[in-house]
């Protein structure tokens, strides 16, 4: 049986710098395909920035054919204008993904950090360091928005794993006891 490749595209939306990361699932193990950023600061017109976001998601889809799409949900700050701009960037990224048949799953920054580091208040540097260990890459990217996007993709994979494990037949109390006999106190 030939299974379809699972490739997850993760996005850290932004109107100045948008991070993207792609992971492929090979034998239930995630592997980094690509990560990077789209720098938008050179474009003064907000609509032109949104157009470039749309085009970048489209080009990533055409190059890698992801099967899943995950995006970081904007966190609520004090600056309403910044929130509106970020929401537009997120909406355009989601629209581009949906145009290519992908449904979008959103994760809060806290959920992503917790999935990767075990700490919902982790710093960008802590997320990057943990991703280095999990996905075995060396270089520190210029912009940690790229590793944030990889974290979004990996969080999505981990969330899916949890659901899959719950659906397995051998995931029950009897199986747990059998596999953890050394933990039983008599």
Image (cartoon, rainbow, N blue to C red):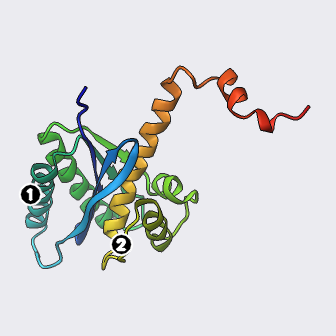
Q: Quadrant of the C terminus?
A: top right
Instruction: Assign a secondary structure to mark 2.
Output: loop
Please tell me whether residue 118 is drawn above or below residue 26 in the rendered image. Answer: below
Residue at far front of view: 1
Horizontal and vertical percent position of residue 182: 79, 37
Badge 2: how crowded within 10 Å, few (<14), some, or many (20+)?
some
Please tell me whether residue 56 is drawn above or below residue 124 in the rendered image. Answer: above
Residue at coordinates 46% horizontally, 60% vertically from top-left? 134
**Considering only order in the chain, which callout, 2 or 1, is on the residue closer to the N terminus?**
1
Which residue is label 1 attached to? 55
Residue at coordinates 49% horizontally, 65% vertically from top-left? 130
Which residue is label 2 attached to? 144
Q: Left of 51 or right of it: where is 173?
A: right
Residue closest to the eye, 22 or 24 = 24
User: Which quadrant of the figure has residue 57?
Assistant: bottom left
Residue closest to the eye, 146 or 179 = 179
Q: Is residue 34 in sight in this rendering?
A: yes
Res. 178 mark: none
Distance from disc 1 to disc 2, alpha carbons, whole Å, reads: 21 Å
């Amino acid at each position: 049986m030939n299974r379809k490749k699972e490739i997850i595209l993760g996005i850290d939306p932004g109107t100045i710098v948008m991070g993207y990361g792609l992971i492929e699932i090979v034998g239930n193990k995630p592997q980094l395909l690509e990560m990077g950023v789209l720098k938008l600061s050179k474009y003064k017109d907000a609509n032109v920035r949104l157009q470039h976001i749309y085009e970048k998601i489209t080009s990533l889809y055409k190059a890698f054919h992801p099967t899943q799409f995950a995006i970081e949900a904007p966190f609520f700050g004090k600056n309403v204008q910044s929130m509106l701009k970020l929401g537009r960037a997120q909406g355009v990224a989601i629209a581009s993904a949906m145009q290519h048949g992908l449904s979008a799953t959103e994760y809060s920054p806290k959920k992503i950090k917790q999935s990767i580091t075990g700490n919902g208040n982790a710093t960008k540097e802590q997320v990057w360091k943990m991703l280095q260990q999990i996905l075995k890459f060396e270089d520190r990217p210029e912009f940690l928005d790229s590793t944030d996007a990889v974290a979004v993709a990996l969080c999505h994979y981990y969330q899916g794993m949890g659901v899959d494990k719950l659906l397995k037949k051998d995931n029950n109390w009897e199986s747990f006891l059998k596999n953890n006999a050394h933990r039983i106190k008599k």
